[in-house]
Structures are given as C-alpha cells and as structure tokens.
Image (cartoon, coloured by chain):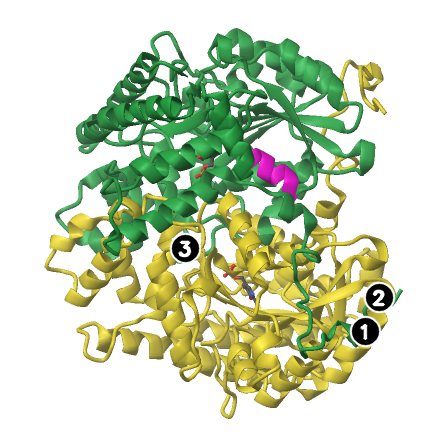
Chain colours: A yellow, B green
Amino acid sequence: MALRAGDHSQVAMNGLKEKVLTLDTMNPCVRRVEYAVRGPIVLRALELEQELRQGVKKPFTEVIRANIGDAQAMGQKPITFLRQVLALCVHPDLLNSPNFPEDAKRKAERILQACGGHSLGAYSVSSGIQLIREDVASYIERRDGGIPADPNNIYLSTGASDAILTVLKLLVAGEGPTRTGVLIPIPQYPLYSAALAELNAVQVDYYLDEERAWALDVAELRRALCQARDHCCPRALCIINPGNPTGQVQARECIEAVIRFAFEERLFLMADEVYQDNVYAEGSQFHSFKKVLTEMGPPYATQQELASFHSVSKGYMGECGFRGGYVEVVNLDAAVQQQMQKLLSVRLCPPVPGQVLLSMVVSPPAPSDPSFAQFQAERQAVLAELAAKAKLTEQVFNEAPGIRCNPVQGAMYSFPRVQLPPRAVQRAQELGLAPDMFFCMRLLEETGICVVPGSGFGQREGTYHFRMTILPPMEKLRPLLEKLSQFHAKFTREYS
Amino acid sequence: MALRAGDHSQVAMNGLKEKVLTLDTMNPCVRRVEYAVRGPIVLRALELEQELRQGVKKPFTEVIRANIGDAQAMGQKPITFLRQVLALCVHPDLLNSPNFPEDAKRKAERILQACGGHSLGAYSVSSGIQLIREDVASYIERRDGGIPADPNNIYLSTGASDAILTVLKLLVAGEGPTRTGVLIPIPQYPLYSAALAELNAVQVDYYLDEERAWALDVAELRRALCQARDHCCPRALCIINPGNPTGQVQARECIEAVIRFAFEERLFLMADEVYQDNVYAEGSQFHSFKKVLTEMGPPYATQQELASFHSVSKGYMGECGFRGGYVEVVNLDAAVQQQMQKLLSVRLCPPVPGQVLLSMVVSPPAPSDPSFAQFQAERQAVLAELAAKAKLTEQVFNEAPGIRCNPVQGAMYSFPRVQLPPRAVQRAQELGLAPDMFFCMRLLEETGICVVPGSGFGQREGTYHFRMTILPPMEKLRPLLEKLSQFHAKFTREYS
Ligand SMILES: Cc1ncc(COP(=O)(O)O)c(C=O)c1O
Ligand SMILES: Cc1ncc(COP(=O)(O)O)c(C=O)c1O
C-alpha cells in the first residue's frame, strides 16, 4: 500500500506541490472541534478594537468583552496576599524586604523548600508539588466537613481545562457502536463538546430545565442515556455545578439522585466544580459531589468513580492567566491511576506559579496571621460585588420585554432567553447564521457589547439565548444591561 | 447494540460492581504510552530519597538526579534580570521600589500594558500576547541574519511539549495503511514516541549514526521511509537539533539535505530546536531549519512546510517550571492555520508568566541598559560552565574501559555506550528487564546516581547506553563521573 511513494503527480502545472497538511488531509476530529467562547464573535470584537484604535468612527467608544469569565481582564484587582507570596517565590531576594508581611514570607519559604533547587524554575513532579497536593487535601477536608481526602488522589493541572481533557482522554475507547459516549449538559461549557470532538468520543446531550431555573432532572438523564445506547457506549456523566453558562446551583437531593443514577447505570462521574466559591443566591449552597457521595455511604461511597475539578481562574481570585487547577479522583481503579500518572508525566509538569497560587487559595491566611484582615476584606468585597451584579443582571433583564432571565444563583454568567422575531430568524437563515449569532453580531456592531450566542453552548431547538458575564465593573454593568435591553427592543421593532 | 443497557451482570458475588474505568476499558492508546525520563527508575529514586530521609542506611548519602534536563533542580541559579521583571509583573507595587533597575521596570510596564486588565491574572489570547509574539519574531529575525518572521506565524505554548503535541495532533489522520506515520530519530526524546502512541499514529524510526557522532544520514531516512510506506502513510519528519539524548549539532549541509529530502518526499518538517542556545563544541554552530530553508530559495523557501519549536526550559535560563515556549510555523496552509488557532483556543491560553519569561529571553537587556553587564555575565557563566561540563563528561567516560562517549557538541546530555557482559544481559532477561535498565537500577541502588537507560530513548538492537545530564554542579560532576565509571568496572567484573 505505498500510497504516496514516489507519487510526484501532486506537482501541479504551476510547479507548486500540494501541501502535506490541508483541510482534507488534517486530523478530521480537530476539524470538527468548535469553541464559541473564542469564536467568530470574539475575532470580530478584536477587529473592532483595532479599528477604534485606528480612529475609525463607530457608534460606541469601546468594546466591552462580556464573553469570557475573565475577572481581571474586566478590572478586578488581584488579591494582594496571593501576589505577595508569588513575588517572593519568583524573586527570593525580596525575602529580605521589610515591605512584605511575615506570613507571606513564611508561606513563600515553605513553598520554595518544596521546589527542586528551591526554585520555581525547576520542573515539579508531574502530579504537582507534594506539599501543595497536601494543602489541597486539607482544603477539601475542611470544605467537606472533615471527610478525608488523600493527597495521592489529587493531581495539579494547567487550569481545570487540562485536567478535564486528561480524564476524558482516559475514558475514550471503542469504535462504532462501542465508542465511548459522554453525557454533558445542554447548555454546556463548550470545552466539553470540543474535547469530545477532538477525542472522537460521542457527545450525549441531556437538557437542563429552563422552566425550573435550569434544574437537572434524572428523568431527562435517563432519556438521554437510553437513546444514546442505540449508537454508543455511554460511560461518563459530566455535571457543571454551579453551572456555566446557566448559573444554577444544584440542591443536595438533586446531587444524590444523580449519584444514584450514575451508580446504577455504571457511569463515571465528572464534577466540574470550578465555581464552588461563586454562590450568591439566598438559600443556595455549594455541595461537593465528593461530600454527598461519601455521606451516602456504601456502595456509593466505596465504589462510585468520580473526578472533581477546581481552578484558580474563578472564585474570588480570578487568576486565569496562571493556569492553575487540580482534579481529585475518587474510587479510581489503581492500575488506571498509574496510567494517568504516566500520561501526565509526558507533559512534564503543570506550571509551578499556578501551583503556588493554588496553594494560597487552598490555605489562605488564618485569623491569627498578619495578612488575615486585608485578605478577608478583599475576598469579601469581590464576592459581595459579584452577588450584587448577579442580582442586578437578573433584575434588569427581566424588566425588558422579550427577555427572560433565570436567577444567577452562582458562577459568573447570565444566560437569558431572548425572543427573536420570525423575520429576524429568516434574515439570519438567509445569511447562513444561527439566529442568535445574527443577533449577537448586530449587537456587537452597534453597541460594542460582546456576548456569546446561545448556540455556542447548546439550547433547545427554536429557543434563543446569549451568555453574558456578570464581571464588568458595577458602574459599567447597569448601563450595559440597559443598552443591551434597548438594543433588543430596537432589533425586535426592526424585524416586526 | 445496547451493549450495557441494564446489564447488571457486572455485579459480582461480593456485591462489588466492576469499575467503569479499568485497564481493559480505558483508552488503549494511552496504555501504550511510555515515558522513560520519568519512568520506573525515577520512581525508585523518589523512594530511595524518602528512605534516606527516614534514616535507612544506604551505600550513599544522597540521590543525584541526572535523569532530567532540569538545570535549576541541579542548583543552577535563575538569571536575576528575568526574575526581577517577572516579580514586577506579578506584584506591580514593586514598580515603586528603588531596588529594581530602571530597564526591568520599563520591561515590566510594557508587558503589563499588553495584558488584559494590565494583569498577569487575565487570560491572554490563545496564541499568546501579541506583543510577545512580536518580540519572538524580532528574535528570530536577528538569529537568522535578517530573514523576516511573521508574528502571526508564532504561537506561544505551555513549554515546547505542548506545541509539539499540538502540531502532531493536526497531522494525525487515516486508518490502517493510511494511518499517519511520523519519522523520529532513534535515539529520541521520548515525548515523541509517547505522543505518537497517544494519538494512535505510526512511529517510524530512523537511526542516528553513533559511529559518526550521531550524525543524521539521508540514506537512512530513505530506508526508514520506504519501509514505512508498506504499512502507513508517512507525513512528517521530526528532527531534534541539537540532539537529545545524543548531543550532536547538525552541520548546515546535513540540514540542507534533510530539507531536500522532506520536500521531495512530501514530509512536513518538525524541527525541535529547544537547545539552540546550547552549543559548546568548537566548530559546531546552530543553524535553524527556518534559516537554511529560506536561504535555499524556492521551491523550498516558498513551499516546504515547517514547524520549529523553542522553550524557556533549556538554554542558559533553564526556567522549566514556568512552562514557556513557542512554535513558529512556515508555509502552513492558511486554512489549517485557522484550525490550529481554533484548537489552541479550547485550552484558553498558555500560562502568562511563562509568556513573560519568554519575552525576556527573546529580548534581553541591550548593551546600553543598566542590567546588561550583570545579565551578560550571568548568561556567559552558565554557558561556559555547561561547555566545561560537556567536555569533562566526554573525557572521563572515554577513559573508562567499556564505556564510549561521543562528543557532547550541544544540548545537556551525554549518551555513552556501555559494554555489558553476556552474563549480565542474561541475568537481566531472567528478571524481565532490559539489560541497560538492569544496569541503571543497580547503579542507582548502589551509588544513588539516577540516569535513564538507553532503551527508554531507543538504540540499535544489542547496544546499550544510558543518558546522563551534564547539569550537576562542577564539584559534584567529576566524582559522579568517576563513581559511575568505577561502578561499571565493578559490574563488569561481577558478571564476567
Ligand atoms: C465550567 C468551566 N470549567 C472549566 C473551565 C476552565 O477553566 P481553567 O482552565 O481556566 O481552569 C471553565 C472556564 O471558564 C469553566 O467555565
Ligand atoms: C528535545 C526536547 N524537546 C522538547 C522538550 C520539552 O521541554 P519543555 O516542554 O519544558 O519546553 C524537551 C525537554 O527536555 C526536550 O529535551
């Protein structure tokens, strides 16, 4: 089968050889990947910013990027203590400076002791610095009311994204009807659909119930699973709690029901809990899958396989650029865990500065530490403002005719439903665009507001949404929400 | 095909369900991955360290990790200027400190201006901060004697590893006899074999010529290619220059011949040039594939596809823990490049601190800057010491009977060939170990010296090698080399 041996017929008349790597010859799985959060709308936003800089006249003076959960890009200030410790670790000469608090110095020294050559510049072990894995384990124990966590089940990662991709990679196998299927929520965070496309696994959609504030319903899980078994082998169930893009926080009973379902149906559970610190609504509370699973006792506690993900990108710290995160695995087969360890070692190690930040996040200053008061004040200020913005967003949107927004109980996004007039839908179809993409593009061109169309996350056929972060600073958020509502009204009139 | 629907037969007699994820059900490609640099020998080294800490008596007092190219772990000090700038970026309050030089402050301010929210904590665009892509382009232009580089062809990455995996991922396609084959050197850096296993591509081995100082020979490339065409579709050729583990630096004529070969045979070139600053031997010089290709003129300059990789982990800086790197693509199909961009966006962005370090590496202080003298002195000291250690390693090994070591022209490793007595080979086989693994394990147990067996990198059948870094500090290196040579002599006597 010497398919290309000596095949010089690819030299065309103009003397140009065809490229080795073309759309036709490249990895077809990669071609199928989509990632809306940084898709066409964001590329257009970048262009508009450039045009503004070049002095092109627009009906707005700045582009507002409400497309991505990137707190510091929207002006949120880093938490002082985190950056002090990191600066000390990066440049240990500063340990002699009188301008850093004692507890920051102690933390930095403790971390440097645990680094190869006492430097952030050494590779760490592939699973992350052991001391920081221990810090994470203590954090989980405190979070979960004393339920033990084993540092050896914790793997530090390059953001949560990396850990999610790693676990999915382990799960993928089979061909045709035995191909691995993975249940994901719709709407979803599109890392999941992208990863499944890349890995050539089957995406199995289960719908969250918009009418019940995006609740997860086990009957719907069962429907999705049964249908999927016709054409693939469903082996994992992903849950995002608190939800992105949907902002719901799951009740404990719901989590219990999901765990029972997963156990009965033999599904590996993946709990994306990167927003565990972002819960705003009264009466809502974060329950970790690990805790609920353990408290349910055997056989769940002893057998149900679970991977839970966390990140330094979200919460009150929003340190996205450092790419820190971790996964805790529970009841993972020991031999598989060795395979995971091996797979991680190929990429050498997660970025050490991200590991350091994670260590601070999971072991913040204690009440007796000199940095405690300031740390606590900064943390509370961020979380209080996020809560206020979550409420404001819901309010303003729900005052607008044709827009309906579920409460933003947690996370960093609203995902309002918008009515689009039939003529707008028709116009979009003529242009070859999803109707909500058409709406969002027009919004961007006319107001500079950059949000992501619901079609990038998935939504029930015939419904339209967009995702907007609640991250713009308060003084910008209200005018933004109003501008957006007004644009929707104008758009609706235009196409009626 | 409801393969597992309602299949509760997996509940065994003891009430235990079989796990969802087991060695049998997991991704078979991941199972096939091997990565010797962090393999069993390193795990054993970790155990020995722990035993030493617990006071267990050993014939040595410390484990010396000469298994991985991790300069700072072996005591190399970070370059002051790099860490100053990074500390300023991490904690901008320091911009008011009198203890940082003006040029470091200017660099830091310039970078912060280019970050979202003027903070390292924001995600960057997925291809990396545009300003830093421009810095990299200027560096490449200077390095290559003025040949232009386009910032838009440069993608910053999470270490070079990440970029290499990304490019390989694009290249993988086909099934059975059309499966993508990738030519890699033997011996190789095992990231390549690991990545190809993970991606289910076909590894096509070409052997470097040990007798000619690990030279690359086009006739051998041709042999490998022809044989491979029987069972796969070879589409890419990887070169590591300077070589890991082999330390050779390729001559310009050799690079030209490789480029002609790749062009004629329609192979995508991947040039791993992470050791471009690590050239020690007199008469050796680094030539980038990009430069040679461009200077060869059309059709090579205009058509041959190339990806070239670089990293902040090696060179004189050795900042492995920060996970910074980049790939420059040349003559890549425009549509494929868009696909690559999309693929990168799924992981959001490379770690920003690594991007910052990369920026410093590619635009270091200029002669007129206050930090120039110190920067230059530190850089030269590291490189001079590495050169001396390269020479010493070669010398001491070649004085030992039964050990033969090619000159370490560049990179950070020696890869000496060792004679092992037939009885040792037989003993290893009885133990189910590769003979050089047996040798290296015994070495570790008896001396505390941790090196990696040649079988982890590949070697000609019946030959045995190990890889040892030249990174231990000078005062430790000589005794280490002597101890190792003596151990080999003793081992040889023992099995004669
Ligand atoms: C639900 C969810 N999971 C995972 C991630 C990945 O975050 P990171 O890779 O920055 O940790 C995000 C980022 O927005 C997210 O929203
Ligand atoms: C030849 C070669 N390529 C790539 C890498 C990857 O380095 P990093 O991912 O740290 O940039 C290494 C590391 O040792 C290497 O030796």
**Residue A253 placement (x, y as % from top left):** 61, 90
Q: Is residue A303 visible?
A: yes
Please tell me if label 3 and label 2 are on a single chain: no
What numbered label is drawn on residue A350?
none
Examine the rendered structure and indicate whether residue B23 appears above or below residue B198: below
**Residue B300 placement (x, y as % from top left):** 64, 15
At mark 1, the secondary structure is: loop
Taking the magenta stretch, the answer to whether it contains residue B318 is no
Q: Which residue is mark 1?
A: B7
Q: Which residue is mark 2?
A: B3
Would you call the spot at circle 2 few (<14 residues within 10 Å), some (14-19), or many (20 or more)? some
Examine the rendered structure and indicate whether residue B436 appears above or below residue B131: above
**Please, what is the three-letter code of the amino acid marked with disc 3?**
Gly
Examine the rendered structure and indicate whether residue A376 appears above or below residue B417: below
Q: Which residues are magenta?
A: B191-198
- Please, what is the dominant secondary structure of the magenta stretch? helix
Subunit bearing disc 3: A
Please tell me if label 1 and label 3 are on a single chain: no
Label 3 to label 2: alpha-carbon separation: 38 Å
In this picture, residue A70 sits left or right of residue A166: left
At mark 3, the secondary structure is: loop
What numbered label is drawn on residue A128?
3
Taking the magenta stretch, the answer to whether it contains residue B197 is yes
In this picture, residue A401 sits left or right of residue B85: right
